[in-house]
Amino acid sequence: MEGAINMDREEQRQKFIDIMAKFTAYTGKYLPDDVHARLKELRVQENTALARVVYDAMFEDLKLADELDRPLCQDTGVIQYFVQVGTRFPLIDDIEECLREAVKKATIIGPLRHNAVEVFDEKNTGNNVGKRIPWIDWEIVPNSDEAKIYVYMAGGGCSLPGTARVLMPLEGYEGVVKFVFDQITSYGINACPPLLVGIGIAGSVEVAAKLSKKALLRPLGTKNSNPRGAELEERIEAGLNAIKIGPGGLGGENSVMGVHIEEAARHPATIAVGLSTGCWAHRRAAIRFNPHIDYEVISHKGAVL
Ligand code: SF4
């Protein structure tokens, strides 16, 4: 069986590139099921004409993106892939190269806005591929021959301007909450609300920052695995909603689609907090491949690529 897979390697590579190119372009046009459902719930909760008009504009935008086969927001972001790959997945050695090719193709078929600017040269590459872009986050899964890949379109107004800081230990969880509220009430609104707030808590700044982004990948409605963490999520969500930022930042019953916290054990002397904000156009999609490079779209029921 392994031999057969090796013989067909180039064919498998092309199949993988083709599927990932189509799936990446698809991600720019259709919101995942959970985000779509949450926006509908939030629309119903609004009492003012202005807030309802903003939600109606979002749904009109989604309808037109489908009808016209176009991205649902002009900022199709920097493409970030979060890869959970089994050690026995046949294309494990090829994934990075294949994903770079997939992004080039998706840029044409999307179309995707050209968003990769080489640092120092200050030159837009024109195909969304550059040094270390698309960004790939790796998780190696032992004893598995499958791969699960999240596509995330990180826009210039939403999660790309995330932030992170190491607090003094005595600032504790109150310090974490203060940091989140200070940030959301100042720069957070740059992401078009309602927001998805991703929070990472750890012992160092880079781990907290990374976890805050991974928190955005969790499906809406899921809770932190620790009951205390889940309670903190609920309390921050209630507090942020009480500010009533509303859809588009124009005021309304709610501010957020959800608050997700992911954590890592910390050093006794440090507590680091990271914050990433997703916008209403939360383009996060997930796909699973088996070793024959057959796929299943997890995030969008009935998706046709
Ligand atoms: S914040 Fe989101 S919806 Fe607003 S422009 Fe950026 S990507 Fe688009």
Image (cartoon, rainbow, N blue to C red):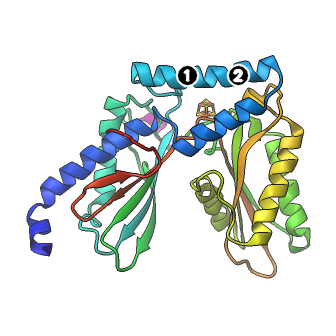
Q: Main secondary structure of the magenta part?
A: loop
Q: Farthest residue toward the bottom?
A: 268
250 and 57: which one is in front? 57
Which residue, given by chain and number where applicable, does mark 2 sit on? 54
* Real-space CA distance between mark 2 and mark 1, rounded to the nearest whole angstrom: 11 Å
Ligand 1 placement by image quarter = top right
Asked if residue 79 lies in the magenta stretch, the reply is no
Residue drawn at x 75%, y 62% is: 273
Circle 1 residues within 10 Å: few <14, some 14–19, many ≥20: some
Which kind of residue does numbered mark 2 sit on?
A: Val
**What residue sits 45% from the left and 32% below the top?**
29
Q: Is residue 115 visible?
A: yes
Q: Quarter of the image holding residue 4?
A: bottom left
Relative placement, left or right, of 125 versus 101 is right
Mark 1 sits near ligand 1, with its Cβ under 8 Å away: no
Q: Badges 2 and 1: C-beta atoms under 8 Å apart?
A: no
Amino acid residing under circle 1:
Asp
- Nearer to the camera, 282 or 118: 282
Q: What's the residue at 53%, 26% (across, down)?
A: 62
Query: Residue 58: percent from the left, percent from the top?
Result: 62, 25
Badge 1 is on which residue?
61
Residue stretch in magenta? 120-124
Q: Is residue 128 visible?
A: no
Name the spot of residue 225 as percent of width and height, x first.
Answer: 67, 70
Q: Position of residue 9 (x, y in %)?
A: 14, 61
Q: Does residue 50 appear left or right of residue 170 in this picture?
A: left
Mark 2 secondary-structure assignment: helix
